[in-house]
Amino acid sequence: MADALVAASIQIVLEKLVSATTDVIGEAFGGFKEELEKLKGSVAMIQAVMADAEKKQVQNQGVQLWLKRLEGVAFHADNLLDEINYEFLRRRMEAQNRLKQKVCLFFSTSCTFAFRWRMASKVKNLNMKLKSINQEAAGFGLSRSQMGGGAYVSPLPAMSRETDSIARQNVVGRDTDASNIVGTLLSSSAIVVSVIPITGLGGLGKTTLAQLVYNVPEIDRQFDKKIWVCVSRNFEVTRLFKLILESLTKRKVDVESRESIVQEVRREIEGKRYFLVLDDVWNERSELWEDFIHSLVGISTTNGNWILVTTRNIEVATRVATHPPYSLSKLGDDDCWSIVKEKVFPSGEVPKELEALKSRIIKRCQGLPLAATVIGGLLRIKRKEEWPAISESGFARLLGGEENSVMQLLKLSFDHLPSASIKKCFAYFSIFGKGFVMSKLNLTSLWMAEGFLQPRFENEVLEDIGNEHFNILLQSSLLEEVEKYDPFSHIDDRYCTMHDIVHDLAQSVLRSNSITDENCRYLLLPSFDEETQGNLKSRSSSLRTLIVNGTVESGEVFLKLKYLRVLRLPLVTSEELPTSISKLIHLRFLDLSLSRFKALPESICKLYNLQTLARRKVAKLRR
């Protein structure tokens, strides 16, 4: 599973190289042009063996290593051609700004010999590496496809079989469970904070049940404040109170001091009765829980507050509970079948082709609503003619316990995504934490900035491709659509998140998202210290996405990561963005929404590749 994304990454980059090389050749000259022609030929040869390499890597470690080496060279080639394209674009822009001669004449007569020589040398060196890789492919006996790289990419499914919209799933089979928990929450309590955990296997629907309870009208009438926090594995008390404050105020909290954060929470809930959901708790350290509860009780002494905890770990549930844990049971066969039917055909009758597979599908659901949803999503993005083959060959490989079976189901769904591009888009989401909610606009902008979205025909709009990918991932149940109001956005947008088990799959597929990994390309840093700064410097040649939270004095350190496509600066205390921002020539997405910059340097106009500039309270900028 760990290498599942390598072939997809290579395929995307190779397709970009073919397109970019074709564009650059038209602008090139002399020996430089000849080397670019060779590069295009080398890429075509590699594309021809990719389908066979992807199959053989499972059993052949040599092919796995070959693919990893090819991935590194492919990314290097992508950076190089992006640099060449940037130089062409820069010269065009300068020519236009100076109102001089036409673009092609300006470039051909004014391009410096130094740039030509340097780029030609780099492309020549790249060609030597690709030649070596092609020779290795021959040694592995990789067969060539006559259709080249496109041979192993499935066509995108027709999304209009039932409806182009994403139908919201109804919660099936949990009304009694919700009623039981709501009854407990509405009962009188003589203590300040009572805790009831929901326990059960991953994929049983603990979070879904908690959401169902959270939105019951009786809960709104019983409690003055409702708070939802996704905890996951990082049970750090200051972080929890920060998330509680953000849930209460519906705004981003920039304060780092625990004392200040707790005081803000006190102002919000003191003297009021609150209902707090702590979703996906894993913490087994009793001292952390006691510290959290002690602080919470100290904030408000009003009786009758409740905490609803969801956890897979029965020991965690027993440790935190003041009320017997609620053990969630499996769904019945009829409920599982209802979920599958609604997922595949949300607004139509079930065809006989699906009914014929009913018993086999129900068996594989094993009473887990997530499994039923994933199976329905997989069948939805496939043609009816493909259903029997998937159920026979795919479902037959699902062995082991319930949670292991769910993970295998998810992997099967991932494997059947219709393109390398969609696979990459799915895995990219895992750099964000569990429970993270993102708007479609932001997500597709990030995909576009990273180059995951490539036009398949002339004049195809990248945003349209992003919307298509977004819908496919929703229909596959690899993303979940949620309702969220963003007080900072004036755009009517859609929002999504990822189930925690699906997130586990995405992380395992992406693999290299740790700052200690020398091949790390996509990174989110929850905080920033001297050790992190040192590690960043050693990742300057590989890192493409960097999203940083926390506070730093200057953004200068991030501007040395010259191959970044996506950069979200943390809270920077300095008031001006460094002029050296212009050195990040590959940058497509720049998020300054956490910063306090009062001015943007003119050099930012030299970021000719920039597609998205995110900045809240733009009116406060001087220029």
Image (spheres, rainbow, N blue to C red):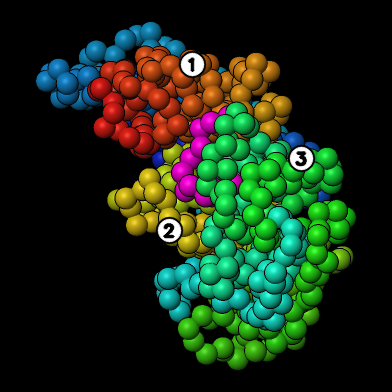
At x 67%, y 28%, the residue is: 515
Q: Nearer the viewer, residue 240 or 526?
A: 240
Q: Are marks 3 and 1 in contact (CB under 8 Å)?
A: no
Mark 2 or mark 1: which comes first in sequence? 2
At x 57%, y 43%, the residue is: 266
* Span colored in magenta: 244-256
Q: Position of residue 202 (x, y in %)?
A: 76, 62
Q: Read off the residue under disc 3.
A: 291
Give the amino acid type for the residue marked by disc 1 in the picture. Ser
Mark 3 or mark 1: which comes first in sequence? 3
Q: Nearer the viewer, residue 375 or 105?
A: 375
Label 3 secondary element: helix
Q: Is residue 259 above or below residue 412?
A: above
412 in magenta: no
Q: Which quarter of the picture shows residue 388?
A: bottom right
Q: Position of residue 166 (x, y in %)?
A: 47, 70
Label 2 secondary element: loop
Q: Position of residue 279 (x, y in %)?
A: 68, 56
Q: Read off the residue under disc 1.
A: 554
Distance (Cα) linking label 3 and label 1: 34 Å
Give the amino acid type for the residue marked by disc 2 in the picture. Arg
Horizontal side of residue 544 vs 101, given as left or right: right
Label 1 secondary element: loop
Horizontal side of residue 324 vs 131, given as left or right: right
Q: Is residue 164 above or below residue 586?
A: below
Horizontal side of residue 225 vs 356, given as left or right: left
Q: Are marks 2 and 3 in contact (CB under 8 Å)?
A: no
Which of the two marks, 3 or 1, is nearer to us in this view? Answer: 3
Q: Read off the residue under disc 2.
A: 494
